[in-house]
Amino acid sequence: MRTWRSLLIVALSLALLLGLAAACEEEEKEDKTPGPGETPGALSGELEIFSWWTTGGEAAGLQALFDLYPDKCPGDVEIVNATVAGGAGFNAREVLTTRMLGGDPPGSFQVHMGHELTDTWVTTDNMEPLGDLFEQEGFNDVFPQGVLDIVSFEGEPYSVPVNIHRANVLWYNTTVFEDNNLEPPTTFDEFFEVADTLQAAGITPLALGDVEVWTSVHLMETVLLGSLGPDAYDGLWTGDTDWTSAEVTQALETFEKILSYVNSDHSSLSWDQANDLVISGDAAMTVMGDWANADYEAKNFEDYGWSPTPGTQGYYDALSDTFGLPKGAPNPDAVTCWLRLVGSKEGQEAFNPLKGSVCARTDCDSSLFNPYLQSAIDDWASDRIVPSLAHGAAASQGWVTEIVDAATAFVTDKDVAAFQGRLDDACVAAEVCS
Ligand code: GAL
């Protein structure tokens, strides 16, 4: 009898102890989950951040985020900066795809908001949903609704936007313009007049570096926008604008004519080497996204001016760099804290002035930004927004690749009819046109 009672007491005490231990464990677990705006417990291990940010302003912006990481995310996480050089990520995406398909995702990777994110990684079930994080961090209140919609699929956000870039910027060397009594062109006619004057003075009118052909596609998208206007431009990506129409022919003819004013060594230069021609004054203008602004800053070049590319005054050809949490990513706690940092006011205010982009958040302090970026902040708030083709916002990755391939042939053969036919075929292959 006594043995039974002793056993019962031992069993009850054990149960009590186990219960207590479970409760403590539960409490510990709860402690690890940070509240809104709070930092998590000590983090450790490696955090691999995959991007294509290797040039001056790109690398500087990324480093600013890395430098802030230990403050926001206490512990001793070692950040692994996994970059694959090559503008606009065409090289990086190949490496990333191989890794993702091989079950070897990085902690987090740079990906453009829009079709590049959604069609490639979200609808294929490769990304973790981030709704809880967005709620905890108040992201739903600080990103514009349009941006929230684009990073979401079926109501759930899948990546955190760190910035907004503008693609349709004409950069020019102000001394060259002043010396030749020129004003930045606002129409294609003005562009050709300015270009003729420059050519007669022995200056390359437009710098292009299309060793990677995305830069020609980038130039082309600004010509399509300036020539067709924003409604018809948007219609190219929804099937509402006919790729075989006379308006598209005219735009492509304008593009062809513009290509006759570029430097002869364009096919051996990168975008930033083309930018160097503007810096040295060998070329007067270049069309590039506003990461070119960060390139000027990183190279201490102040003698630049900017304006929207011809015909695009009042339109903002936009793209955004974002980061998400791939399914099966190593060290997900460290990644989640990276995402908190990327979306935070502090993170975006440190990153964007160096990167040449504006905050995706609406509450950044604009006094931290240079005059170009302050003008971009104003334009972003008031312009008509359209999605960039070359930078993943407008069309799926497969469609962009088809267009890049067609453009590769076009920059050499200059055959407008053949190019237009291939562009139409690409739209059909993407199942957007019939
Ligand atoms: C864009 C990217 C920018 C910048 C640029 C040149 O696609 O969004 O952040 O890096 O490529 O590499």
Image: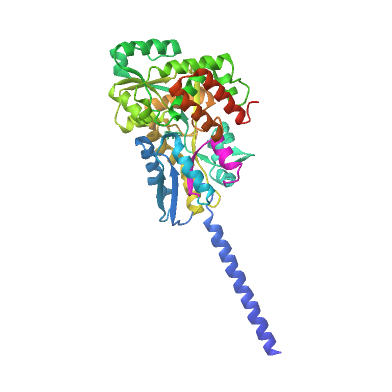
Magenta span includes 112: yes
Up-down relation of residue 290 to residue 43 (above or below): above
Q: How many marks?
A: 0
In the shown orientation, is residue 144 left or right of residue 206? right
Q: Position of residue 212 (x, y in %)?
A: 42, 32
**Which color mode does the image show?**
rainbow
Image position of 134 with respect to 221: above or below: below
Comparing 191 with 44, the one in front is 191
Residue 139: x and y, percent? 54, 40
Give the quadrant of residue 310. top left
Is residue 97 rendered to the left or right of residue 367?
Answer: right
Which residue occupies the foreground of this view, 135 or 403? 403
> Is residue 172 in view?
no
For the N terminus, which image quadrant? bottom right
Quadrant position of residue 263: top left
Give the residue displayed 63% in from the left and 28% down from the top: 432
Q: Nearer the viewer, residue 328 or 408?
A: 408
Which image quarter is the C terminus in?
A: top right
Residue 197: x, y in percent? 34, 10
Looking at this view, is 105 or 179 the one in front?
105
Does residue 49 show up?
Answer: yes
Q: Residue lying at the far right in this picture: please name it.
A: 1
Could you say where residue 233 lies in the image, as x and y percent from the top left?
Answer: 56, 21
User: On screen, 220 above or below 106?
Assistant: above
Part of the protein shown in magenta: 105-127
Split into quadrants, the picture shows ligand 1 in the one at top left
